[in-house]
Amino acid sequence: MKNSYWLRSGFYTLSEKAAALLFGFGGAILLFRTISQESFGVWVLFLSITSILEVGRIGLLQNALVKYLATSSGDEEAGRITTASLVLNFLLTSIIVLFLLLLSIPISHWLDAPELAGLLKIYCLTTMALIPFFQGNYIQQANLDFRGIFWSNVVKGGILFFYILFLFVNKVEVNLPQLAFCQVAAAIGASITAWVFAKPYFRFSKKLDWGWVEKLFHFGKYVFGTNLSTQLYKNVDKLLLGGLPGGGKIAVALYDAAIRVTNLTDVPTASMANMLFPQSAKRMQDGNGAVKKLYEKAVGAILAFMVPCIIGVLLFADWIILLVAGKEYAEAANILRITILFGLFMPYAVQFGTVLDSIGKPRINFIYTIGSLALTAVLNFVFINKYGAFGAAIGTLSAYAVTFVFMQAFLRKHLKVNPLNPFVYMVEFYGKCLKFGLDYNKDRVGAETVEPFQAAEK
């Protein structure tokens, strides 16, 4: 049963993250070749801002709903929890819409991107359309059903990707407002899909329980702050690069070309985090030792994938950028050689946050994330003013390295985590893969040897 959970959830979550990333990556490859670097830089800034807002909303809603639904005492309590969560979803979405309407113009002025204001206003429709998408997917996750999460994300990413592909194939001029309105259509399609798959698990109460609203909010507020800060942490380099004199929209486009390749390595990290949260929440009953082992194994499994990728990118960065973005972005190759090193630190950082949330310490995770954000902003401010897009890469990598030391010191003190153990599990993973391959080949050779004798006997 345990293996069945990991295999089933692993397949769907890995496939979901891979599909979303590949649709985004594929769309970017087409946009690199169809719009100017200035326009692409504006689109990157738009996606950065909206992703910060949406990930913040996910933080307030997801972990609290999954945690309490997974441990609810029955349908009646589950109904009160789900209804309270839906109310929080509406309230937070309203705040996001108000934020975008009020600040879209000032933000576009700061980033020297007038087109950005219109895109952010269009996104108000997208974020409202995503309410059923998020609610349905969290309910499914709480019930350990990942099918609908996969298909709704495929619809969400696929609609935008195939629209861009259609414009590219037919050589139709691409403009950014068209892409923003296509996002609205994608959000509607994804929400319908998520709602259909989540329907068997729906439990709603006729009366709103404000006690549960308050409880979900107080649990989620730290995760909200952490996720918001984490996403700022991941995008502050682009935002500062767009707003500081040493950067600009073209610098953002070059930097994003490198980041797009680097983000391909996020698939195993994000997938493992989604699987780890409900499991580590349950492992708390077995003590810190069980959580420690789960953390180290999860990081080790991710590193087993990451390390070969990092080596390959370091060797072939020039060819990769040429293939992905074209010769106009050739300068991004050396930026990529720096950003790919983020992959050595990200597995530790992401699983750190997941474990702290699952063991009931979201406040500590929030404090660490705020500190990391501040450090990243300071280092990026210094290096961007000196080195432009290269400075963004150097500043962010330096911040990851310093943050890694402090996070591992905390885990060492409270969970006895050894940061070297994931590499031990990584080597064990390679050994098991090699053994599996040798055994499979041996069995195959043996079967081929036996078959002629069986045929002769007949």
Image: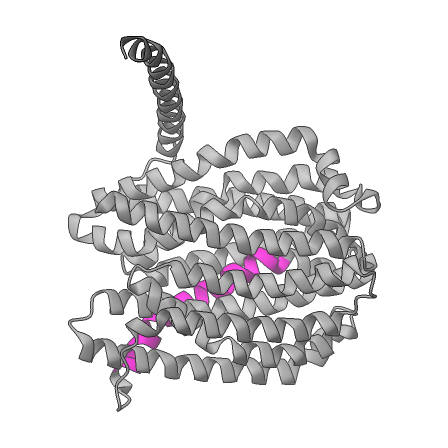
Question: Within the magenta stretch, is there residue 383?
Answer: no
- In the rendered structure, the answer to whether residue 278 lies left or right of residue 344 reads left
- In the rendered structure, the answer to whether residue 277 lies left or right of residue 52 reads left
Q: Residue at x 58, y 70 (%)?
A: 186
Residue 8 versus residue 100 in the image, above or below = above
Q: Which residues are magenta?
A: 212-236
> In this view, which residue lies farthest toward the front?
458
Q: Could you tell me which quadrant the C terminus lies in?
A: top left
Camera-side residue of 163 and 452? 452
Camera-side residue of 158 and 75? 158
- In the rendered structure, the answer to whether residue 437 lies left or right of residue 75 reads right
- In the rendered structure, the answer to whether residue 203 lies left or right of residue 352 reads left
Question: Within the magenta stretch, is there residue 221?
Answer: yes
Q: Residue at x 54, y 30 (%)?
A: 308
Tell me where residue 212 sits by quadrant. Answer: bottom left
Residue 352 locus on image (x, y percent): 39, 49
Residue 269 locus on image (x, y percent): 46, 47
Tell me where residue 438 sits by quadrant. Answer: top left
Q: Residue at x 20, y 66 (%)?
A: 71
Residue 68 locus on image (x, y percent): 25, 69
Is residue 183 visible to us here?
yes
Q: Please, what is the dominant secondary structure of the magenta stretch?
A: helix
